[in-house]
Amino acid sequence: MKNFTKTLLVLLLVLIIVPSIMAGGKSESKGEEKIVVTAMGYGDNSNQEGLAWKRIVDSFEKENPNIDIQDELLYDEAYHQKVVARLASGDVPDLAYMGADARWGAPWMEADQQYNLKSLIDTDHYDLALIPEMGPNGEIYEIPLGTSNITTVLFMNKNLVESLGFSQPKTYEDLVAMVPAAKAAGIDVVSIDGADGWAWGSCLMSSFIARTSGDLMWVSKALAGENKFTDKAFVDALGLISTMVSDGVISKKSVLVDYGTNVSNFNNEKALFMVQGQWAAGGVENPAVADSMVLMAWPKMPGEKASAAGSVAAAWSVGYGLTKSGAEDPAVRDAGIKFINYFYSQAEVTQRLRDGAIVAPVLKNFVVPDDLPNGVKQKVVLAQTASSSEVIDAFLTGAPNDALNAGMQKIASGQATAAEVAAEVEALARK
């Protein structure tokens, strides 16, 4: 009887203790399976970017309960300052909002935290042709929110051009042919906000130097010492300004036109074409113009090289990427990529396009919704079909860039020659 009682007590203890141990083990196992991804998101709780980020993180975690996105959300200068501080302290996030240029990419590059995503990119989801190579060996450090920001767009009022008996120009000579009819109608052929120095560099010269040199990366090579601003290609590109003024394609009075007036002139059909960046499409509010306008690359220009034909200048978009630190752990790396792909889902990207947050998606075989405005559709078509060159002021800054912008205004108004401006820029760039 004693043995039976003892055995019964042992069995009871086993029944009590074992489930407890097993429960504890399960709880611990679950904790170990949770993958934590530290992230730096861009935005705040009061703007569209921040609200979208929080919504996407919450939705992703619900669909992926084994992944915990531990995020910090900051905006504007606060974001840049925190990036520098965290990298300096060694508190490196696994995933972050970043770029590959001087402002958005330099801190990550200097901290040796840029990680090449190229082998991890799902080519069934993304169109690699729309994602620029960001490193010397073709590296891709972040998935851009959208295609590059096109700065050298020629906006065409299709109906107005056709009313004068012309069609979309294929060559510079086609633009010249429109001058007499445009003058007779009291309108400009091409309008540019020439009072804004940056417009000459970002919206005109950035395309022209690629065209005359045949090199889409001529500017960065010049800063690296491989090219000179006194080279024939650069002088020829500057010379196109005086050629256009002389031919009547651009008015000498354009140096007095500011941004608002430029857009207004196009809106009010006082110009057949407008020079600006893709963002100006939002300012074209006259339905008669907005519904018929075409966003195009400059036509074939005098002295143009075939290797840069039809190209536009465009600044790389920022986006989300992994850090070297985050990619060290395969589980964190894979979870991070899974989140990035979720962030760039078809539905989310389409909404960003609707909101005007991106120029065009980098998704493969993206179909533009029929109900989008003509201007938005035009941006997508141009971004998906034109090759891109560098934007000058993404590389050339300070005194040399200021001299270039002011110099182009002088060329347009007849106060300086292309060679004189080129020499001044070269001298300042080598100081």
Image (cartoon, rainbow, N blue to C red):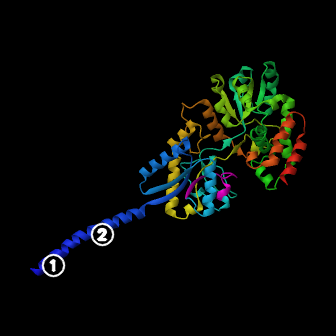
Q: Residues within 10 Å of mark 2 (few under 14, many from 20)?
A: few
Q: Which residue is mark 1?
A: 6
Q: Residues within 10 Å of mark 1 (few under 14, many from 20)?
A: few
Can you say whether 337 is above or below 372 in the image? below
Image location (x, y in percent) of residue 58: 45, 48
Query: Which stretch appears magenta?
Result: 94-108
- Say if the magenta span includes residue 97: yes
Please, what secondary structure does the residue beneath circle 2 have?
A: helix
Q: CA distance from mark 1 to mark 2?
A: 22 Å
**Quadrant the C terminus occupies:** bottom right
Please, what secondary structure does the residue beneath circle 1 have?
A: helix
Q: Which residue is mark 2?
A: 21
Judging depth in this view, the residue of 49 and 113 nearest the camera is 49
**Quadrant the N terminus occupies:** bottom left
Tell me the amino acid under the disc marked 2: Ile
Tell me the amino acid under the disc marked 1: Lys
Considering only order in the chain, which callout, 2 or 1, is on the residue closer to the N terminus? 1
Seen at 80% across and 46% down, the residue is 401
Image location (x, y in percent) of residue 109: 66, 59
| 37 to the left or right of 89 | left
Taking the image as drawn, is residue 369 in sight? Answer: yes
Can you say whether 97 is above or below 365 in the image? below
Image location (x, y in percent) of residue 160: 71, 22
Judging depth in this view, the residue of 369 and 327 nearest the camera is 327
| 33 to the left or right of 53 | left
Taking the image as drawn, is residue 250 in sight? Answer: no
Seen at 80% across and 52% down, the residue is 222
Residue 134: image tag:
none
Judging depth in this view, the residue of 110 and 138 nearest the camera is 110
